[in-house]
Amino acid sequence: MIGEFIGAGALGAAGAFGAYWYLKFRDVLPMESSLQSSRKAFADFTVFARETMERAFAPEQPEHYGDITNYYLMKLHKSFPDSSILLFEKEPGQWRLVNYLKYFKAEPKLLTSYKWSAFDRSSAEGELLRFDDVRAGDYQGVEELFSVFGIKSALMCPFMPPAGAPERLMLFGAADRSFFDAAQPYLRFVASQLSSISRVSDKVFSLKKEADQLKNEVNAVVKELDVAGSRLIQRARERKALYEVVTQVTGPGGDSRNGCAAILNIVAKMVEADVVACLLYDEAKGELVVSPGSYGITDAERMLYSIPVNNQSSSSVRTFLTRKPFISADAQNDPDVLARYAKLWEIHSLMIVPISLHDRIIGVMRVGSRRADFFTPDQLEFLTIIADELAIIIEMVTLYENLSKTAQELAQLNKLKDEFLSTVSHELKTPLTTIKGFVSVILSGEVGPLNEQQIKFLTVTDQSVNRLTHLISDLLDLSRLNGKVEMEFQRMDLAELVRNSVSSMLLKAKEKNVALSNETGKDLPQVQADTRWIGQVVDNLLINAIKYAGPGASVKVSGSDKGEAVVICVEDNGPGIPQEEQKMVFDKFYRGKASAKQVPGTGLGLAISKSVIEKHGGKIWLESRPGKGAKFCFALPVPKQEA
């Protein structure tokens, strides 16, 4: 009985064991195999997506979009090497094959244009179309194309081109449809990426177009300003010449006759006149008489010309009385002119303008040329301006006094500005120190734990406070250097100072992955200098070299004895400085165009360094070629006994 029970149990166990393995082989193992295949497919797709997205960028030129498209298609073909990938571009009424990916031993001969309604339907719907069995139908030339590529099943996937470019679609073809399910997410991903890049590139192209338009507008404005500037320069030259005459007249030992002669000489040259004279009103005689210093006439001829102001047949008298300028093309044959005076001076063309001092008429200016019909209304207008300048020659003394007073006021304002800048900078340092102290305490965790976002925000705040503190320090230094800062000159070992600076910068160089070395010898002669300020110059040059040289670069410091001077150089093998920017690197607040947005800074370090070196009687300069690095050097004089 017991044996039968044991036998039945063994038989049941064997049956259960067999049923377990039957079910495992029938259901579980296929599911596990399917899950493993899905995981592998997902991993492969993740790698594909990551690699393609790493190479994605917003193209700056329309042709760059084609390069990105080709890259995506090559990556797709690498994932499905047995497939054929064709790229089509829409033309009026047909589609043009612009690229394909498939391995051929010999390049086939293909048509350039094709027609198939499925192309139009896929492009219009913007959706992926699947053809599990491509059959001959309403397509022109496509059947032959599919035959060459061995395509029997196909996936069509449209994507967005850049603005203004023809529509495009990808055709993914194969001899069978066995791996279409695996290929669909790849195609959708590629189409989505290319469409996104297209939208971004459209914005980039639009912004670039707007920038070019703004640039052209700015250039047009600048050109107009140049023209206006040229006119202003010409007017300034004219005024300058007249002011020089005023200085001669009103200065010590001035001679009004020589001053008037200088003005008339200027007028003659500007309008190419043969005769220029001032006829001033003599109240005692009631006449217009020629003043000394006339251009183009002798003293004897001058003495012969005097006209009573009641003789209105004279054009000079009428101009004096009416204050209206007069011009004649031929004075010797003009009934409005006294011909005998025109013949006396041998002139034909004539201009006469009034000379007024405020509301009082004091005379006229008479300008003549031996050529007929020579003067123009523009010259008459210019002559009127000159006459006004001549009339106010007496007031120039007051003008110069006012200018002198204004210059003193500007100097005082500049002094107040420097004092204000220094005071404000000092006042700003105290609250900044407090802010930095509290931020550091909070970041240290002494007042409680912080989450990642709080730490990030506080770190940005701490860095901003550091930059602001550095800017204020530079402004303070610049303010001191612009004022009468007292340098504490003493004998110092420049080589030792350089070694200390290099040591303090090693950590910063390591953080930037820059190799920093010191090749300064120990036998440099001592110099008379302010240790603090010269140390700041060396630090500034080292910091700039480390920042701008870039990761992987090298920076070296060297020193040499030139007899009467010691030269210290900081050299890097970075990108260098463009030739057109080199003359501006020592200007206040100037920063290079290429690095202004990439490397933080104030643009004051080199300006401060230049001021310090010059106050030491030295010289600082730059040697650089684009792509060959930059070399900043400064020279300090050696005391005569040392030299």
Image (cartoon, grey):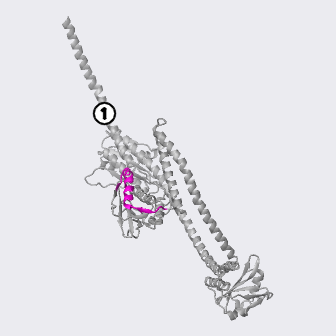
Q: Is residue 154 visible?
A: no
Instruction: Check if residue 495 falls in the magenta segment.
Output: yes
Q: Is residue 525 visible?
A: yes
Categorize mark 1 by other alpha carbons within 10 Å: few (<14), some (14-19), many (20+): few
Instruction: Check if residue 552 falls in the magenta segment.
Output: no
Question: Vertically, is 134 above or below 487?
Answer: above
Quadrant showing the N terminus: top left
Which amino acid lies under the numbered mark 1 shown in the image of this protein? Gln
Residue shown at the point (23%, 15%) measured from the top left: 13
Report which quarter residue 67 is drawn in: bottom left
Pick the residue in front: 571 or 375.
571
Q: Is residue 483 left or right of residue 181?
A: right
- Coordinates of residue 587 in the picture (x, y in percent): 49, 63
Pick the residue in front: 205 or 551.
551
Dot 1 lies on which element?
Answer: helix
- Coordinates of residue 117 in the picture (x, y in percent): 42, 47
| Image: magenta residue range | 487-516
Residue at the far left: name it: 3
Quadrant showing the C terminus: bottom left
Residue at the far front: name it: 641
Pick the residue in front: 219 or 620.
620
Report which quarter residue 266 is drawn in: bottom right
Residue shown at the point (66%, 84%) measured from the top left: 255
- Coordinates of residue 533 in the picture (x, y in percent): 46, 59
Identify the residue position indicated by label 1 in the image.
36
